[in-house]
Amino acid sequence: MYIVINGGGKIGSYLAGTMVNSGHEAALIERRGDIVERLAAELPQRILLIHGDGCDVSFQEDAGVGRADVFVAATGDDDDNLVACQLAKVAFGAPRVIARVNNPKNEDIFNALGIEAISSTTIIARMIVEEATVGDIHTLIALRRGSMAIVEIGLPVDRCVVCNKAVSELELPVDCILVAVIRGEDEVVTVHGDTRLQPGDVVIAFTAVEHEKALKKALTGA
């Protein structure tokens, strides 16, 4: 799979690194020069880094959006994410476009334009409503006609098999990415390679539906 990501912040850079470490190809577009320099030192060299504006057709062309299986807009600006996704769809025919949506009110607009919208605010709100049970797995959002999903998995308080281990050390199924952790009553932790899970954490993950059970087993041992 070849994925192009616009936005080299925490989400975009983590996604790029995770995809490459899982055996996929990735390109990352970032407009801020200082961030590009830092990412060049931190990320795997196999990632194609493009210093430019992901809303510009020339930089999307440099990143190879025309051959990408997935285009992801992960900046902190909904307008930029919308423009970048529309450009990828219209100019390059990207078969799948996914956008980070910072304002949940914009989700309907993105979805109406055929863009898969992911809002962390909406995910957390749904978790509160659903009152997740520790050890269970709940599908929060189904994507790509049901083939991909954002799920939550509660880690057991006792005998946690993955606790106190860095996320980069965990043996997770293919196409499974840990996105965030809900810890305690009000703490939300963005997951990085050096993040260490704790007993009772609720893990938010992006996964292929067919691997949900394997992901739960990898995290809980059950």
Image (cartoon, helix red, strand yellow):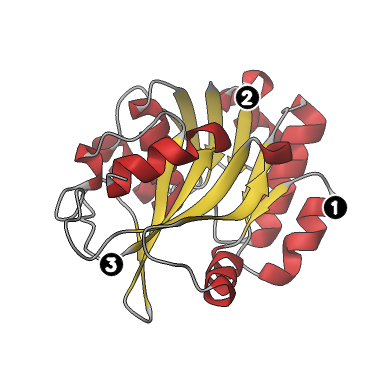
Mark 3: few, some, or many residues within 10 Å (few <14, many ≥20)?
A: some
First in residue order: circle 2 vs circle 3? 2
Residue 50, image x, y percentages: 48, 33
Residue 73 visible in the picture: no
Residue identifier under label 3: 200
What's the CA distance linking mark 2 and mark 3?
36 Å
Instruction: Evaluate if marks 2 and 3 touch, with contact meaning CB atoms under 8 Å apart.
Output: no
Residue 78, image x, y percentages: 66, 60
Q: At 18% across and 55% down in the image, what residue appears?
A: 163
* Label ID, residue 39: none
* Label ID, residue 69: 2
User: Height in image: 133 above or below 33?
Assistant: below
Mark 2: few, some, or many residues within 10 Å (few <14, many ≥20)?
A: some
| Kind of residue at badge 2 | Asp
Residue 6, image x, y percentages: 55, 42
Residue extending furthest toward the front: 222
- Residue 169 located left or right of residue 149: left
| Kind of residue at badge 1 | Ala
* Label ID, residue 112: 1
Comparing 48 with 142, the one in front is 142
Residue 92, image x, y percentages: 75, 26
First in residue order: circle 3 vs circle 1? 1
First in residue order: circle 2 vs circle 1? 2
What's the CA distance linking mark 2 and mark 1?
21 Å
Comparing 126 with 22, the one in front is 126
Residue 23 visible in the picture: yes
| Kind of residue at badge 3 | Gly
User: Height in image: 66 above or below 169?
Assistant: above
What's the CA distance linking mark 3 and mark 1?
37 Å
Considering the numbered disc 1 on the image, is that residue within a helix, a strand or a loop? helix
